[in-house]
Image: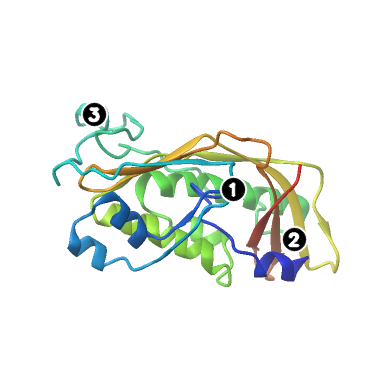
Amino acid sequence: MEKFLKDSVVLNRRALLGGGALVGLGALLAACGQQANNEAAATATAAPSESPSASEVTAASATPSSARGYSGGSKAPDGEYRPADKYGPAQNVPKPAEPEDGYREKSVEGMRKTLDAWVKWGNYGVQTGDYSMARQFVSPTFKSELEAYEGVERLYQHGGWVIDGIESLTADGAPWSEDGETYFWKAYHVWEKEIYVAADGSWRSWTNEDKTNDTFIFELKHNGQKWEIMGYKGVDD
């Protein structure tokens, strides 16, 4: 099971965990008509989409490069959260609370608290372009996940943003292990849509229309100090 998970192609968990195309930022910006200097800074490639679980719509036409503004059409007062929309990125995104006490413990509760913190900080990252905390819950060997973070961070750095992209996980049953070291936990992944907006206002979106294949098995391992998420793989419900 462990080798199976690590050898699988693990897609960008934000828009693509539900089964869309693997889009590196270079491919995204090219598809969106981003400016040439931004395209040169992002060189990831794209893999074809084969799953019907996520419908994809791409806007090829571009609007002026000054498209980025304020969500809601104006600057929000300090402390007022506004989600991202076609006008601009989310404003005043609240930081999640620190992980629950005991999340480092080698226990089922420690594992649950780790997954919970990972999801919350991932939701913060997709709204802000800052995955510094989310990275703390991911194994350094889980390179596809870390590369996905880097792609979204570059999108923000080059003036783009993400609309929605919020997700949650609902555990199905109890975790199990075959060797007492590596653990697996089946969970249902909930997400509705994700829209990547380039700095010029062009965009690419995914919608989770088919929710029959949103169940995944997550792989975790305790490194002696804390739990690390090693990978995940889609499974039949």
Residue 132 showing in the rendered view: no
What amino acid is at disc 3?
Answer: Pro
| Residue 51, numbered label | 1
* Residue for point 57% across, 49% down: 17
* Residue for point 69% across, 61% down: 220
Callout 2 touching callout 1 (CB < 8 Å): no
Quarter occupied by the N terminus: bottom right
Q: Which of the marked residues, 3 or 1, is nearer the chain's N terminus?
A: 1
Q: CA distance from mark 3 to mark 1?
A: 42 Å
What amino acid is at disc 1?
Answer: Ser
Residue 84 falls left or right of residue 67: right
Residue 125 showing in the rendered view: yes
| Residue 77, numbered label | 3
Q: Position of residue 115 (x, y in %)?
A: 63, 50
Residue 2 falls left or right of residue 45: right
Quarter occupied by the C terminus: top right
Q: Which of the marked residues, 2 or 3, is nearer the chain's N terminus?
A: 3
* Residue for point 70% across, 60% down: 219
> In the image, which is nearer the foreground, mark 2 or mark 1?
1
Q: Crowding at label 3, few (<14), some or many (≥20) Cα neighbours within 10 Å? A: few
| Residue 106, numbered label | 2
Please state which of residues 205 and 87 is positioned toward the viewer in this rendering. 205
Position of 75 relative to 181 (above/below)? above
Q: Position of residue 141 (x, y in %)?
A: 58, 72
> Helix, strand, or loop for circle 2?
loop
